[in-house]
Image (cartoon, rainbow, N blue to C red):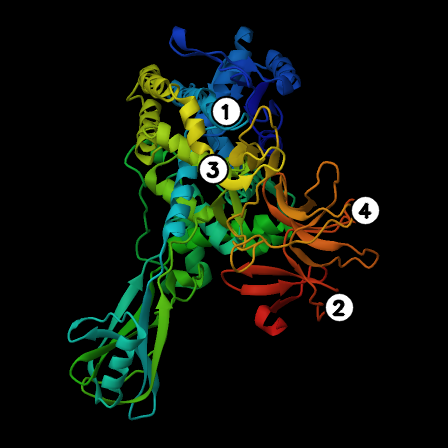
Amino acid sequence: MAQNLVIVESPSKAKTIQKYLGQGYTVLSTMGHIRDLPSRDLGINIQEDFKPLYVILQRKSKTITQLKTAAAKADTIYLATDPDREGEAIGWHVTRVLKNLNKPTHRILFYEITKDGVKHGIEEPRDLDMNLVNAQQARRIIDRLVGFKISPFLWKVLYSGLSAGRVQSVALRLICERQAEIDAFVPEEYWSLAARLKTAKGITFDAELSKIKGEKAKLSNEQETQAVVDAVRQAAWQIEDVQTKRVKRNPYAPFTTSTLQQDAFAKAGFTTKRTMAVAQQLYEGVTLPDGETTGLITYMRTDSTRVSPQAVGQARDLIGEKFGEKYLPKSPRMFGKKGQGKVQDAHEAIRPANPQLEPDAIKSSLTSDQFKLYNLIWQRFIASQMQPAQFDQTTIDVLAGDDYTFHATGSELVFPGFLKVYPEKTHKEDNHLPAGLENGEALTCEELLPEQHFTKPPAPYTESSLVKVLDKEGIGRPSTYASIISVIQERKYVVSEKKKLYPTEIGKVANQLLTTHFSELFNTEFTRQMESELDKIETGEMAWKSVLREFWSYLEKWLESSSKNYSEIKKELVEETDEICEKCGKPMVVKWSKYGRFLACTGFPKCKNTRPLDEDSPTDDASAGAGETGEKEDLGNCPQCGSPIVLRSGRFGKFYACSNYPKCKYTKPYKTIMDCPRDDCDGKIFQRRSKRGRVFYGCSNYPKCDFVSWDEPTPHACPSCENNYMVQKSTKTKGDYLYCPKCKHKITTSASE
């Protein structure tokens, strides 16, 4: 019997495929890349036309030995790495490692890890697509050039260890620009005026002022609002116009990577990284109740909304059987590719590999995260082939006297259509208005409801909204969104607080430097153009070396321009202060280190006095450590040596410390939350920050007491199990609530109060 070696990337995928192929096949995994550019050197010979100097990854030596041994025994080698640029490149690297064996080698693609999907892939072998390989090589080399050539600029201006990334730095720029908009925002006052109206039959509804003398109503202050209230209080009210029309709401297309990440964040609270990790598990295979191991979804890195006719037919069969013919459109609903190029349509949309496997039927075989994500993907796909939802939308215009028009809008669901499977939140306009109203009908004004408002700044980015704008602007590719967001947080350029992304101080400064001195590189237009050129390499429309040469010509010019004035740039970052050095009497200035900003004496190097500088994180109270006048608050004296206590910032957040440090090393927590809930502990719970910048809550007696919580604890006892504390949580659907980590009981914040 012929022996065949199938090489994939993931061990779990290898196990699933091995079961389908059986005897005659050996399935092994590379566990990701086996070769790459060296980690500490540039690894690119620019003089030899950007020749990449790949090295075998040290941690993969055993894997390579295993692959070589199996390949020597095999008659044929099949490269079944992931069906994208990265997978094509990994397959090519494998051929470079095994090239001396001279064995027949084929490229095969598994878009779904099912029996049919694997069989189809084996039956359609092809050669490696070097356009795909070269597109990945070009991306890797360009990103390496940016990282290795521009990061030193940050080291020389700020401190070593910082890094710049071609795409990540643009994402950071978006977050910083949004935060700058928020910081600069000046709220403006405005008022709304609603009227509670009653019909002759005693039915009430609310309408809001929309026009004054035919023009759009605009009430800027209380005086203007009161003038309108006085004018309409005694006015005659009557219905000017009533219209009801049937409207349809069409279903959404099946998921792409971007829309899956957005919906998983909104509906399940998943980060992009968590979404992609769980999707990978569903793609690679899960063991079902009958003992069969199969992949549950198609490949999860895609820009396309296209679906195969076979899958559409399976969905339509299920809809007809489960929901009835009235939920089934007369003809299949087809979705096209999202982009303009062939690259965008390389794969199908993300869908269930077998729509007949309903989420509830296999729930026992899935983890909680796997069920949530599979359920979301299944619902979205099935809903995409269902009838539109239908609403009766009613609009009412009401006249108050001759000059004032009030408006009410409502809608009522008359046929759920796709919402039967893929429910959505009720929108404000989906409220019910009374039926049977007629033009000219008189109304009685029961109550006038003026309300003051203030305009709000743009919301900080969440992972979901950032992915949406990255996708819209063509920055990066779906497979990179999760790593982009992870990297800027790991570099401590961005922190996530209550699911919102905020730039840190070092993130703001790094962004300022990069966008000032490399503005042509770190902008959305250039990044979008580069992605387009990488796509053209993939389709064979551009040569990868020509793209590299052109990019390097730009980068050389930008590097030369930025290297002329390091000292001037550093001076611009130094901030003068009113602080005086207590050791030599000279002024103190603000400088940067890898732990953030600090005060340093201008007498350096003769005087090396430094002091930590108190800083506020994006969600800190700006008045922390200060009185109402803005002057520094007296924090008392050190109980050990009597010196004044000061507020300092360290690697893991703020803390109180003795000003006589390092002679006296007394510290105490900043912002104590509550007493430690452990019965045998007298410590205090306070806010800290992990090495990756994530906020958590721990005990001041650590390491003796290991109490820790990612959610802020509160001394409110659980009414269900009498646990002596609960934690605060918040979601879009539930709002603010308290949660017991012991028995999982939940109560609303209002109920707890």
Look at the image and tell me whether residue 238 can be seen: yes
Q: CA distance from mark 2 to mark 3?
A: 54 Å
Front residue of this view, candidates 263 and 94: 263
Viewport quadrant of the C terminus: bottom right
Front residue of this view, candidates 224 and 748: 224
Question: In this figure, which residue is indicated by the disc labeled 2?
Answer: 722
Mark 1 surroundings: few (<14), some (14-19) or many (≥20) residues within 10 A: few
Question: In terms of secondary structure, where does tag 1 sit?
Answer: helix
Residue 333, given in percent of the width and then of the height, sits at 32, 51
Vertical position of residue 535 compared to residue 421: above or below: above
Question: In this figure, which residue is indicated by the disc labeled 4?
Answer: 704
- Of labels 1 and 2, the one closer to you: 1
Mark 3 surroundings: few (<14), some (14-19) or many (≥20) residues within 10 A: few
Q: CA distance from mark 3 to mark 4?
A: 43 Å
Answer with left or right where residue 604 lies relative to residue 410: right
Viewport quadrant of the N terminus: top right
Residue 603, given in percent of the width and then of the height, sits at 55, 28
- Of labels 2 and 3, the one closer to you: 3
Q: CA distance from mark 3 to mark 1?
A: 22 Å
Q: Give the label on residue 155, or none.
A: 1
Question: In terms of secondary structure, where does tag 3 sit?
Answer: strand
